[in-house]
């Protein structure tokens, strides 16, 4: 597999480190003699998640396509966590309050996001990530209904 390179500004060390972290975790795909079959990044913005996912093309997971697809949810979610549980895994953190959305600049509490609105977002995520992009598993994390786990085999 050819390494997909991103052009980064020198001051963006956080993104550079996230890319290296994911690259090391999928080291077997990059000809490295090290990998981690189980790891997860810390919370990433949509832009950061897109950058790290573009590196990976693993079985049914096409990182370029997934990265492009999550762009439609930018500003609707709180954060992403990307990693590996044998195969690629994506955790989508959904906000409970409007000020928790990644695009919010508010520091004080916003308004509560109704369950019906959250359900519509989850249905749209599922359609995109499962129906269009072939995710093998999709569902809320036990004990945290506002975090969705998406896994590709």
Image: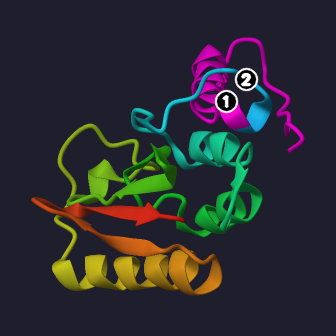
Q: Are marks 1 and 2 in contact (CB under 8 Å)?
A: yes
Question: Where's the N terminus, which quadrant?
Answer: top right
Question: Where's the C terminus, which quadrant?
Answer: bottom right
Q: Is residue 141 above or below residue 37?
A: below
Q: Which residue is mark 1?
A: 27
Q: Which residue is mark 2?
A: 32
Give how far across and how far down residue 135 sits, in percent. 53, 73
Classed neighbour count for the residue bearing mark 2: other residues with Cα under 10 Å, few (<14), some (14–19), many (≥20): few
**Residue drawn at the location 31% of the way across and 60% of the way down:** 94
Classed neighbour count for the residue bearing mark 1: other residues with Cα under 10 Å, few (<14), some (14–19), many (≥20): some
Give how far across and how far down residue 57 sits, in percent. 74, 53
Colouring method of the image: rainbow
SS label for mark 1: helix
Residue 2: in magenta span: yes
**Residue drawn at the location 60% of the way across and 39% of the way down:** 48
Pointer 1 or 2: first along the chain: 1
Give how far across and how far down residue 115 sits, in percent. 18, 79
Q: Given the current orientation, which residue lies at the most extreme left position?
A: 143
Residue range corresponding to the magenta coloring: 1-28
Q: Nearer the viewer, residue 80 or 21?
A: 21
- Labelled disc at residue 144: none
**Cα distance in 3D space between marks 1 and 2:** 5 Å
SS label for mark 2: loop
Q: Nearer the viewer, residue 111 or 115?
A: 115
């Amino acid at each position: 597999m050819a390494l997909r390179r991103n052009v980064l500004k020198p001051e963006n060390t956080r993104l550079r480190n996230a890319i290296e972290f994911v690259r090391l975790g999928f080291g077997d795909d990059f000809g490295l003699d090290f990998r981690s079959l189980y790891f997860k990044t810390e919370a990433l913005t949509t832009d950061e998640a897109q950058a790290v996912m573009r590196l990976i093309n693993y079985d049914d997971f096409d990182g370029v396509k997934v990265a492009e697809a999550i762009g439609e949810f930018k500003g609707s979610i709180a954060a992403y966590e990307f990693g590996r549980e044998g195969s690629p895994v994506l955790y989508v953190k959904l906000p409970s309050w409007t000020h928790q959305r990644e695009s919010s600049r508010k520091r004080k509490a916003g308004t509560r996001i109704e369950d019906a609105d959250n359900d519509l977002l989850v249905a749209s995520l599922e359609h995109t990530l499962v129906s269009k992009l072939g995710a093998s598993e999709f569902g809320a994390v036990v004990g945290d209904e506002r975090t969705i786990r998406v896994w590709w085999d």
